[in-house]
Amino acid sequence: MTMTLQAFMAQLTIGLIGGCFYAMLSMGLAIIFGLLNIINFTHGAQFMMAAFLAWIGLTQLGPWLGFPSFAINFWVALVIVPLVVAAVGMVIERALLRRLYQLDHLYGLLLTFGVALVMEGGFRYAFGVSGQGYEPPELLQGPFDVGFMLLPKYRIFVVVASLLICFGTWYLFERTKLGAYLRAGTENPKLLQAFGINVPVMITLTYGFGVALAGIAGVLAAPIMQITPLMGGNLLNIVFAVVVIGGLGSILGSMITGLSLGLIEGLTKVFYPEASTVVVFVIMALVLLVRPAGLFGREV
Amino acid sequence: MQKHLLAGAFGVSLAALMASPSLAADKISDNVVKIGILNDLSGIYSDFTGKGSAVAAQIAIDEIGGKVLGAPIELIAADHQNKPDIAANLAREWFDQGKVDMIADFPTSSTALAVMEIAKQKNRITMLSAGVAMAAITDKCSPLNAQWMVNTYALAAGTAKALLKEGKKSWYFVTADYTFGHSLEKDAAAVVEADGGKVLGTSRHPFPGGDFSSFMLKAQSSGAQVIALANAGSDTINSIKQAAEYGIGRNDKQVIAPLLAYITDVKSLGLAKAQDMYLTEAFYWDFDDRSRAFAEKYFAKMNRMPSASQAAVYSATLSYLKAIDGAGTDEAGAVMAKLRTMTIDDAVIRNGKLRADGALVHDMLLLQVKKPAESKRDWDFYNVKAVLKGDDVFPKPSDACPLNKAG
Amino acid sequence: MSIKPVSLKPISLKPMPLKPMSITLKIFALLVAAALVVPYVPGIIYPIFVMKVMCYGLFACAFNLLLGFTGLVSFAHAAFLGSAGYVTGALMIRFGTHPLGTVTAFTLGVLASALVGLAIGGLAVRRRGIYFAMITLALSQIVYFLAVQFRWTGGEDGLQGIPRGNLFGLLDLSSDTAMYYVTLVLFSIGFLFVYRVVHSPFGQILQAVRENEPRATSLGYDTDRFRLAAFVLSATVAGYAGAMKALVFQLVSLNDVSLHTSTEVVLMTLLGGLGTMFGPLVGATLVVGLQNYLATIGDLVTVVIGLIFIVCVSFFRRGVVGEYLEWRRRRAQRALPAREPATAPSPSHAP
């Protein structure tokens, strides 16, 4: 099939949009892993939960409360929903995860997996599986001519917003004092505790922060994807591979890996669409052969 | 350990087991006619099958009066979780120990094909009210199976023919990359090419997919008049939704045609995004007085309108019970023979004839999704554009099915 | 990465003393004897259910061999179960009537899973801990993709109506009763094989690697090679169960290679008791029974399974068999207060 440069650019752009979601999700996983040493299998479910909460806020909450005209719009949801999701996440961390830190990491992984199943099942029970639609805010409706294609304004917003969030997170963790504490906590929690820092609270907040990133991604995804209980689980497998490729140690690494894999996936969709999901896993296998620790990782 | 669990779960008397289901002297085996509904109660197909299917079957049983040939009619439903081995095991148990005579529904082809095989071994009947796989009436056909609603060919052919008639001759397929998608694409492409149309290209996307904009943009730039979606469920919904985002398929030059879409999908998409689309279905609740009467009964119990699959369970159950009555026995072979002589005409299926290979050939509906302004109430989604004669849309009997050669 | 807290007991590389072995074998012999009767009492125990439990039980034993005794978490075990099933099934459909068909198809199926195990394991053992788990998860996705793509696997429809064939032209397996006894024999062989591996010097080295890798390395063991060997062995046994399952149920589907099945086997092992010989069997019985039960309650299946995961991990980490052994150990300890506290028996010695 012949393809013009324009069409090629368009496909790359779409790949970049996908990459933004990978980047945000894998950053959240990397942050949580960095301090808690667990792989958060609930990440996908938390992403899904955020999308659902945004939808509930927009369409359901008013009627439930008896004020049919009351609705939480997209912009408000973008702030509130991640906080709610993070709060729920922190409760899970305090009530369940905390008990497992002394044990093998496997248990943390299995626990978060179980929580993910409960959340998926619960939303499915409450809202069915066909899924719900969410309109982008009025300001961002319609397409915008970027020269080589008509790009929906909302998608441009997603790219800009997620890049900002990624860089902000990176700055916070790598360039501020708070970030220094967090990194110190990864290396030697006991020492940090001795300096008078409340490490358990820091762990809870870090988990909340990682989850909030999934929450933001979820709200951003709501107008793009059909909101279904399975939307996160499907994505999470790919994000795991992204994380393995990038190496869990590095925040910047997971961001760069996420974005570039989005691009690669976009390219695959052009040349061999059937393999566009599996290509990520193939790349992962190749990276492991060459650099077992991942592109940006340290050996653990 | 094992003993306790089992004793609790499957305690069934030996005597019942010994009774052979095919003794001619017994008009009704085990003195009960038991119908099983096997579908997805918890997964991605639960909206258009699920609990509603069992409710539809119960409506049919109630209409018959709860008894056939003096024997009570019982209903049992279970969740096969879309796993063929769970479906197969449940079916085995139901046949061996649960006195079940017929199992209906099966929203996934893998579960349908698995249970058909077992039913054939055990001389019981399967009725695929939700199963649309062509394999069920071609190379995997069974004399004891009826595909009671539709198959991928009929769905594809119905929509394709209608669009070709409107002069839309160039097509592009966005296809889910698995058997179901492939066969939907193949059947539609055959119809398109037979009627002088042209297939300009195909994008096969992984299943399940997330972002379809890439494929839809490729389809758009192909310049095809029709972008046909050979996928299902959330893949179809996401394709349409994301196409709308990019303004694809919103003009006279290009339309989007989902080859398989249920009323639940349209509900989930919303009329604003789905409007003007053509689709083919076996049943629409607002078709005429008879269909509305059934639908209202259903609505009273479920608070939603029946999908075509759910309605087909009603029709399958009703026809099965009538056939037992007519045949004077519930022996599988005799009931199937009786079903093949009947003309099916009820609230759901019209002008239905069951073929040797198990295909139920009947009238289909060509529907167009209403604009939001035209819709007067919830579930008021379609304009019926045409009633398609069964012979025009259902596939010819296939040589791959040995049953077609015999008769 | 170690699953249990590091034990201070010196690592013994000698074969285990005979006595605890015989307890395991005695219990196993009793179970087999009970299983022999099942086809005569179908009203009490449904034989097909027992066959399913045997297939999944062995599958869980294979998984336990890796996780419980080697400390490696794999999310790829469905890939082994499924690939053996697909190969066996596809061959049976073509050559099922030949007197040697069943035996050949079965053997090649198991061989296929060993090869897939070698490929996945070869990559995965390069990393430790959580990376290892995620690599197996990602690689099993490739196997899933291939199963969807290949024509001979039947794609989404899977393979149905796989003939069971016959044994050397002598024993026709199409009857459920004949198949039942063949399954019982195959299962016993598989179980005893796992038992043998765990109690062999090789198995002891694996546990040594799990408990204290630097020490095992210092003793001159190439730990990566032992890990890989354990992985391939576990994959092979999982494939053995998969080939069995394909013959018993006469169908293979994508579900057999799905992540879902991989997590189910984790649940079985965890629920029954990690690192115990009978835990996986108990776990498989519970999960399979639960599946049957949940089938009729409908929409809350995932929630219930998720809650079981949470409860198991939070409060019930030893699993059914593990808790029982722990309870017995405590009772024994209380009975002998004067003696020095006995060292906790490493799970593998226990029945």
Image (cartoon, rainbow, N blue to C red):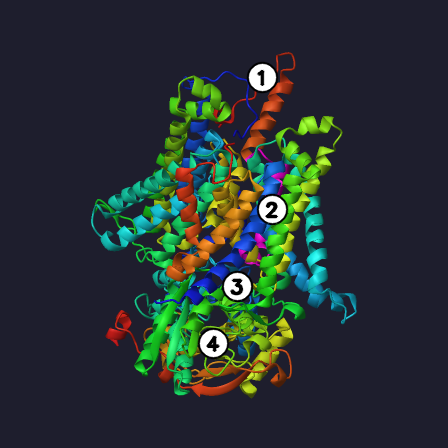
Front position in the image: A112 or C103: A112
The kind of residue on which mark 2 rests is: Gly
Tell me the distance, in whole angstroms, between the alpha carbons under discs 3 and 4: 40 Å
Q: Chain of mark 1?
A: C
Q: Residue at x 67, y 41 (%)?
A: A206
Give coordinates of residue A250: x percent, y percent.
56, 40
Above or below, C50 against C122 in this view is below
Tell me the distance, in whole angstroms, between the alpha carbons under discs 1 and 2: 45 Å
Tell me the distance, in whole angstroms, between the alpha carbons under discs 2 and 4: 37 Å
Front position in the image: A28 or C13: A28
Q: Nearer the viewer, mark 3 or mark 4?
A: 4
**Is the C-beta separation of discs 1 and 2 under 8 Å?**
no
Q: Nearer the viewer, mark 1 or mark 2?
A: 2
Q: Chain of mark 3?
A: B
Query: Which residue, given by chain and number where applicable, does mark 2 sit on?
Result: A28
Q: Could you say whether the residue bearing mark 3 is in a helix, strand or loop?
A: strand
Q: Nearer the viewer, mark 2 or mark 4?
A: 2
Query: Which residue, given by chain and number where applicable, does mark 1 sit on?
Result: C342
The kind of residue on which mark 3 rests is: Ile
Query: Which residue, given by chain and number where applicable, does mark 3 sit on?
Result: B76
